[in-house]
Amino acid sequence: MDFSNRKIVKTADGSNTLKLNDVDENFHSCNGAITESMHIFINNGLLHIANLKNDIRILEVGFGTGLNALLTIIKAKELNLKVYYLGYEAFPLNEHEYKSLNYYDIIGNNSSQYFYTMHECEFDKDFMIADNFSFCKKKEKIEEAHLPKDYFDIIYFDAFAPDIQPELWSIEIFQKISNSLKSNGMLITYSAKGEVRRNLKNADFIIEKLPGPPGKREITRAVKR
């Protein structure tokens, strides 16, 4: 599959996303890109951890458009959280693609400077995107990544759907990223497939079913035992 063959599409809340042309698969929900990311990764991910601590390390599997990271920066500034953010993306956006996304127009809060810096900064180097937000991105498959042990507080798992990238939803991958989580660290994802939840359980996660965003009945939060 050609993951670089994609086009810009508008979603129901007015925010843009990308669609893979080879298959019927969007980077974000057609019911609202920003709405989906806020519900899953911020409201049920970041804010859950922020109730416990204010110095947070995040791993994102599937950096993609950068929307999850952008919303995290804004919320971290609002709540005075200190965040280290590491994003993996094997097929990064080109300049035309990320400049066609309108997230900062909708979000405001000087978010365009954060958004462009994340997309234009070098790979494999740490950058202070904001006073409280350190960021690094890697152009690498998570299967090949060398992750630190017992390091992250939360994983944003935002890979393409299991039928598109089944290798990323395996027990082996979940075990690998579980090893990089601190005790009681958590993984949050949009997928609620039975196979995904079974693989998470077999990787020694405790599963929690949560209500989904518009157009989706459930999402999954998994806590490391």
Image (spheres, rainbow, N blue to C red):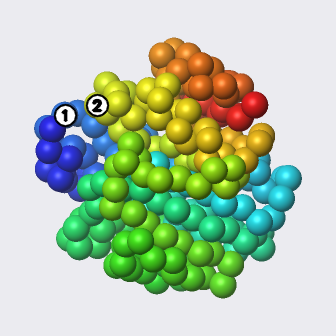
Q: Residue 23 carries which label?
A: 1
Location of residue 96 by image quarter: bottom left
Q: Mark 2 points at which residue?
A: 164
Q: Which mark is residue 14?
A: none
Q: What element carries label 2?
A: loop
Residue 27 horizontal/vertical position (percent)? 35, 46
Mark 2 residue crowding within 10 angstroms, few (<14) / some (14–19) / many (20+): few
Q: Is mark 1 on a helix, strand or loop?
A: loop
- Earlier-in-chain disc, 1 versus 2: 1
Tell me how far mark 1 sits from mark 2, CA to CA: 8 Å
Mark 1: amino acid: Val
Mark 1 residue crowding within 10 angstroms, few (<14) / some (14–19) / many (20+): few
Residue 155 horizontal/vertical position (percent)? 59, 47
Residue displayed at 36% across by 38% down? 160
Q: Quadrant of the C terminus?
A: top right
In the image, residue 157 sits, relative to residue 117, either above or below, namely above
Q: Which of 197 and 19 is in front in this view?
A: 197
Of circles 1 and 2, which is in front? 2
Residue displayed at 57% across by 82% down? 128
Mark 2: amino acid: Ile
Q: Which of 194 and 101 is in front in this view?
A: 194
Look at the image and tell me whether residue 40 can be seen.
no
Q: Which of 26 and 69 is in front in this view?
A: 69
Q: Is residue 79 left or right of residue 132?
A: right
Location of residue 15 by image quarter: bottom left
Residue displayed at 70% across by 74% down? 77
In the image, residue 201 sits, relative to residue 181, either above or below, namely above
Residue 69 horizontal/vertical position (percent)? 52, 63
Q: In which quarter of the image is the N terminus?
A: top left
Q: Do the residues labelled 1 and 2 touch (CB within 8 Å)?
A: yes
